[in-house]
Amino acid sequence: MNVAAASPVLSDLASPSAGSGAPHGHDPRCLVVADVGGTFARLALAETTPGQTPRLGSYRTYACADHPSLAAILADFTASLGLPVSTAVVAIAGLLDGDVLINANLPWTVSLSTTRAQSGLQELQLINDFEAVALAIPYLQADTLVPLNGDADPAQAFPALVLGAGTGLGA
C-alpha cells in the first residue's frame, strides 16, 4: 500500500481553491513529496493540515535516466506547479552517508547540499525509501495488513515488517 492509496487524492492541489478546506486558524502547508528509485522518480504536491490526512495531487513521473540530476527533476516539478513551494521530502533508494547518497543504480550522484542549492528549495530532506514505507505503517488501517503467521489477533500489537524489491534487487 502506498501513501497515495491511503490518502484522499486531489486532481490538482495547485488550484487557487486548494487551501479552502482548511479549518479556521490552520493554514495548510504545501510541500513536494517524492519517491525516487533507480528507474523512476514519482512526485506529488502534498497539502498538510494538522490533524488531517495529507492530500496529494499534481502527480508526475520522471524517468531518472532522462534528467541530469535529482535537482533538475525537483526544479522542473516545482516550476510546473505555478505556486511557490520551498520544501521537499524525498524517499530515495540508497544510504545517505553525510551529504552524499550511496546508490549504484541512479544515473547521477546525489549530494544533499548541491541538490538543495540547484533545485531552488529552501528545505530538503532525503530519507531511505524503505524507511519512508516503515514510517507510514502506524497510519495504515488494520484490514490492509497481512499477518505472516496467519492467526494473529488483530486486537494485539505485533512488530511490522516492510518487504519489497526495487531496481537494486540483486545489484
Image: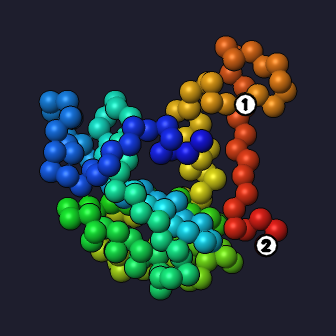
Q: Which residue is drawn at 33% across and 45% down?
A: 10
Labels 2, 1: front one: 1
Residue 165 locus on image (x, y percent): 73, 57
Q: In this view, does 52 lie above or below 88?
A: above
Check disc 2: other Cα within 10 Å, few if <14, some if 14-19, many if 20+: few
Q: Which residue is drawn at 24% across and 55% down?
A: 14
Q: Looking at the rendering, which quadrant does residue 93 occupy?
A: bottom right
* Residue labelled with disc 1: 146
Q: Residue at x 72, y 68 (%)?
A: 168
Q: Is residue 25 visible?
A: yes
* Residue labelled with disc 2: 171
* Left or right placement of residue 135 versus residue 71 in this view: right
Secondary structure beneath label 1? loop
Coloring scheme used: rainbow
Residue 8 locus on image (x, y percent): 39, 37
Q: Which residue is drawn at 15% across and 50% down?
A: 16
Residue farthest to the right, as pictured: 149
